[in-house]
Amino acid sequence: MQDPGRRHPIHLQARGGAGDSVIDFVTICTKGRQPLLACEALHALLSEVWRDFSRWRVGRYVILPDHLHFFCAEAPENETPLESWIRFWKSTVSRKWNQSTGMKADLWERHFWDRQLRSGESYSEKWDYVRNNPVRHGYAKQPEDWPYQGEIHDLQW
């Protein structure tokens, strides 16, 4: 149980047994909830960095203006904790974005939220919820109309 007075999320290690797959659902916000993410350039940059730094495999994702949701799973023989991997790619994306734009934007909140899913059914249920976020926020009429989403790896149970 989480302490109601806690200000930051707890990041648990993957709890799957030998050969078990674990899928994590992650939410990350921009610093100060700045609406910076929903553009083609950042979408392409995030996709590139997630493909290049594949210690964790990113499955389905949705990028909204001020936050993003994605599902990920450890790559085989990975020894990098989720928190370290996220810190690494957030730093890489920020550095590359600032170089390409000439800005000094601090893109990310320091912390993120993660939850380990329990079954293939919860992955599809959670994805249905996530892919409808642009509709709920009024950014698109249908989930498939939102251009800042995709899937990099097919995550399997």
Image (cartoon, helix red, strand yellow):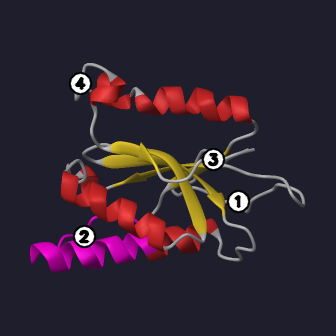
Q: Earlier in the sequence, mark 1 or mark 4?
A: 1
Q: Residue at x 60, y 65 (%)?
A: 56
The secondary element bearing badge 1 is classed as loop
- Give the label, 4 or 2, closer to the camera: 4
Q: Residue 143 carries which label?
A: none
Q: Quadrant of the C terminus?
A: top right
Q: Which of marks 2 and 1 is nearer the N terminus?
A: 1
Q: Are marks 4 and 2 in contact (CB under 8 Å)?
A: no
Judge whether 99 appears above or below 136 on screen: below
Q: As shown in the figure, which amino acid type bears the numbered disc 3?
A: Arg
Q: Earlier in the sequence, mark 2 or mark 3?
A: 2
The secondary element bearing badge 3 is classed as strand
| Residue identifier under label 3 | 115
| Residue identifier under label 1 | 12
| Residue identifier under label 2 | 106
Specify few, some or many for label 1: CA neighbours under 10 Å numbering under 14, 14-19, or 20 or more. few
User: Residue 53 colored magenta?
Assistant: no
User: Residue 109 colored magenta?
Assistant: yes
Q: Position of residue 39 (x, y in %)?
A: 19, 51
The secondary element bearing badge 2 is classed as loop
Picture quadrant of residue 103: bottom left
Residue 41: in sight, yes or no? yes
Q: As shown in the figure, which amino acid type bears the numbered disc 2?
A: Asp
Specify few, some or many for label 3: CA neighbours under 10 Å numbering under 14, 14-19, or 20 or more. some
Is 22 displayed left or right of 45 in the figure?
right
Q: Where is residue 80 in the image (x, y as percent from the top left)?
A: 65, 76
Q: As shown in the figure, which amino acid type bears the numbered disc 4?
A: Gly
